[in-house]
Amino acid sequence: PGVVLWGPACDMAAYNEIYQFFLGDEHGGHMRQLHLPVPIAPDLQSGGELVNPSFDPKTQTLSAFNKSRGLGDCGTATRWVWDGKAFNLLAASIMGPCRGAAMAEWPTLFVGRRR
């Protein structure tokens, strides 16, 4: 309560849409850039720019799916969960080579669990 996640679209291409995310108060004030732990080094932070993002208010989960090509058989898939103060890394997968692999077959970089 009292926190708003705001993500305006910044760029669009053939199959990827890029959004920049911010957190603010419920009146749209005190906006600050969202910083997210990144999958390769969870102690580092990203600048809140996400590709093809989605947010599930029921589970408080923010997701991003960066497609390396339109088919969606390669790229990165990442999820973060809100703990009331910040988004924490929940899961990350990556598939470098585009070989028609389903996302369930992608190598996992990180798996967390909810408490």
Image: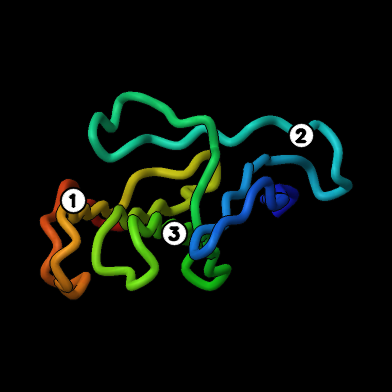
Q: Count neighbours of disc 3 (C-alpha within 10 A) and say few if under 14, some if 14 to 19, many if 20 or more.
A: some
Q: Which residue is mark 3?
A: 63
Q: Secondary structure at mark 2?
A: loop
Residue in the picture at 34% in, 53% down: 78
Identified by mark 2, the residue type is Met
The quadrant in which the C terminus is found is bottom left
Upstream in sequence: badge 2 or badge 1: 2
Specify the quadrant that holds the N terminus.
bottom right
Tell me the tag on residue 31: 2
Q: Nearer the viewer, mark 2 or mark 3?
A: 3
Is residue 34 something that shows in the picture?
A: yes
The disc at residue 96 is 1
Of residues 95 and 77, the one nearer the viewer is 95
Of 83 and 79, nearer the camera is 79
Query: How far is disc 2 from disc 1 in space, using C-alphas?
Result: 35 Å
Q: Mark 1 or mark 3, which is nearer the start of the sequence?
A: 3
Closer to the camera in the image, 21 or 30: 21
Q: Whole-percent x and y of residue 39?
A: 27, 40
- The answer to whether 8 appears left or right of 64 in the picture is right
Mark-to-mark CA distance, 3 and 1: 19 Å
Q: Is residue 115 visible?
A: no
Helix, strand or loop at disc 3? Answer: strand
Residue at point 47%, 48% (across, down)? 83
Q: CA distance from mark 2 to mark 3?
A: 21 Å
Near mark 1 (Cα within 10 A), the count class, few <14, some 14-19 or many ≥20, is few
* Residue type at the position of mark 3: Ser
Q: Is 14 rendered above or below residue 81?
A: below
Q: Residue at x 19, y 61 (%)?
A: 98
- Pair 3/1: label in front: 1
Contact flag, marks 2 and 1 (Cβ < 8 Å): no
